[in-house]
Amino acid sequence: MPIYEFECISCGHRFERLMKVAEEAPACPSCGTAGVKKLVTPFRTNGWANFLDGMEKKVSPGKFK
C-alpha cells in the first residue's frame, strides 16, 4: 500500500496516510473537515545509489575492503 500526502483545504494541515489505491480520501485529523486534497509527492528510492555503489565496487574493489 502506498503512502499518500494530503493537505486540508480548510485549515492547511498536511498529513500522510497509508491507504489502498481505490480508498476514499480521509477527513483532516486536525479539524475533521472532509475537504482534503491529495498532494503530488515524488517517488523516492535508493536504487540508483545501490547501482552506483555496485559499479564502483567492480571498478575499484580495493576501496571497499
Image: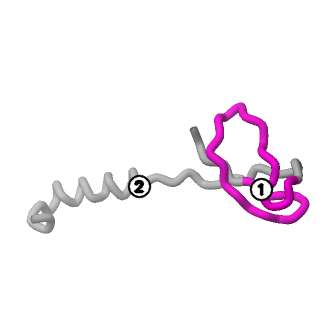
Q: Is residue 39 left or right of residue 47?
A: right
- Report, in whole angstroms, how far the alpha carbon at label 2 lies from the one at label 1: 31 Å
Classified by dominant secondary structure, the portion drawn in magenta counts as: loop
Q: Residue 1 carries which label?
A: none
Give the residue displayed 87% in from the left and 65% down from the top.
11
Circle nearer the N terminus (2, 1): 1
Give the residue displayed 14% in from the left and 64% down from the top.
64
In the depicted structure, whether residue 63 falls above or below residue 49: below
Residue at mark 2: 46
Circle 2: residue type: Asn
* Between 62 and 14, the one nearer to me in the picture: 14
Residue at the far top in the pictured view: 22
Categorize mark 1 by other alpha carbons within 10 Å: few (<14), some (14-19), many (20+). Answer: few
Give the residue displayed 51% in from the left and 54% down from the top.
44
Residue at mark 1: 29
Query: Mark 2 or mark 1, which is nearer to you?
Result: 1
Q: Is residue 46 left or right of residue 51?
A: right
In the depicted structure, whether residue 26 falls above or below residue 14: above
Q: Residue 49: percent from the left, percent from the top? A: 36, 58
Q: Look at the numbered disc 1 and give the secondary structure of its residue.
A: loop
Quadrant where the N terminus sits is top right
Q: Is residue 21 magenta?
A: yes
Give residue 12's quadrant in the image.
Answer: bottom right
Give residue 22's quadrant in the image.
Answer: top right
Residue at the far bottom in the pictured view: 63
Quadrant where the C terminus sits is bottom left
The way the protein has been coloured in the rendering is one colour
* Between 63 and 41, the one nearer to me in the picture: 41
Marks 2 & 1, CB-CB < 8 Å contact = no
Q: Is residue 48 left or right of residue 27?
A: left
Q: What stretch is highlighted in magenta?
A: 6-32
Circle 1: residue type: Pro
